Image (cartoon, helix red, strand yellow):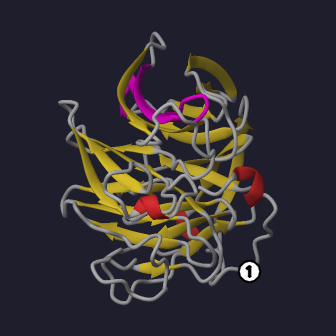
Amino acid sequence: MRSLVTVLLFTAGSLYAAALPGFRVQMLGATSGFASSVAVDSHDTIYYSTTAGDLFRFVDGQSTLVAHVSTVPDGNSGLLGMAMRDDQTAIVHYTTPGQTADVISAIDLRSGTETILHSFVCDIEMPSRPCPVEHHGGNPSVASDGSIFVGIGDYNGGAIAASPQWNGGKVFRIFPDGSVEQFARGFRNPFDMAWDAAHQRLIVPDNGDAVDDEINIVHQGDFCGWPFTMGDGTAVAGAVAPVYTFPEVVAPTGLVALSGHNPYLRRGYLLATFVGRSLEYIPDVDATPFPAPTPVIQDETPSIIDVAEEPDGGIVFVTGNAIYRLIVPPLRTRAVSPVH
């Protein structure tokens, strides 16, 4: 994700499609600090993380501190995101003070106890040397088999994204037995992703260098082009091209695969955008040609950082300072046809 401070200087223009009619938002409450992610357990309890290292439980508009990890928020560093492994465990991604490593940990949501699962050193040549605060990625994602996927950005270093030896610019898979696999490389700053178990692939948005934010369909071993190409740039031998490039800067952040329980948004994906200030609906990643994502809402709130689905199909999302719920149109109005 781009530096949150820098991105705030952008002004999002009109996007490529009008927002869907009838959808609106409801603010559920303020966050306690600058939020970096949101997640929901099977009992519809909301959790969120903040860049300062705190993980909160959010009930009836009130935040209760669950755990804290040792980190320093600065640019795209700090506690970058979380995902639910089960109702008792959250998986978090954060940078160590000085940005010497990106850490993936399990947090016991009852006791707040942290168990480090893996630490990805930032500078392989001098592990104790701090690296830049930018481009450390964001949310981990937990697959149905218990594997954890996480994207780490290129630390604003470009070339290391293509080098298999470095951890920056990669997507990793941490298996339930603790083993780690470099799943794919050649990313600039992937903030979130979703595992498609049926097709053994990841859906990975990536933040571009200019007007080249992209959506990728990624398989094990893929090279996705950065820093040699991005978006609709010149094709590079051996690189897998994105399936979609946004025509304007949107800064893709959170991504959720839809379960089929929402009355309108039954399949596909919802993507949160930081600069676009929108929730983008992607109905079918296999459609040819790839359909332009449709804003479900846009400019209704400050910049959106992450989005999650509740057990009944409800949608909640988080900006830097508040949690919201997406309110769908009443079915009788047929403002939007349900997607089957």
Q: Does the magenta segment cover residue 104?
A: yes
Query: Is 149 above or below relative to 330?
Result: above
Q: Amino acid at mark 1?
A: Ser
Q: Position of residue 294 (x, y in %)?
A: 55, 76
Categorize mark 1 by other alpha carbons within 10 Å: few (<14), some (14-19), many (20+). few
**Residue at mark 1:** 14
Q: Nearer the viewer, residue 77 or 58?
A: 77
Q: Main secondary structure of the magenta part?
A: strand
Q: Position of residue 275 (x, y in %)?
A: 69, 64
Span of residues in magenta: 85-108
Report which quarter residue 338 is drawn in. Answer: bottom left
Q: Is residue 338 visible?
A: no
Q: Is residue 274 visible?
A: yes
- Could you tell me which residue is drawn at 58 percent across and 33 percent down? 49
Question: Is 118 on the left or on the right of 147, as rendered?
Answer: right
Report which quarter residue 226 is drawn in. Answer: bottom left
Q: Position of residue 264 (x, y in %)?
A: 47, 65
Q: Nearer the viewer, residue 124 or 231?
A: 124
Query: Is 10 above or below relative to 50?
Result: below
Q: Secondary structure at mark 1?
A: loop
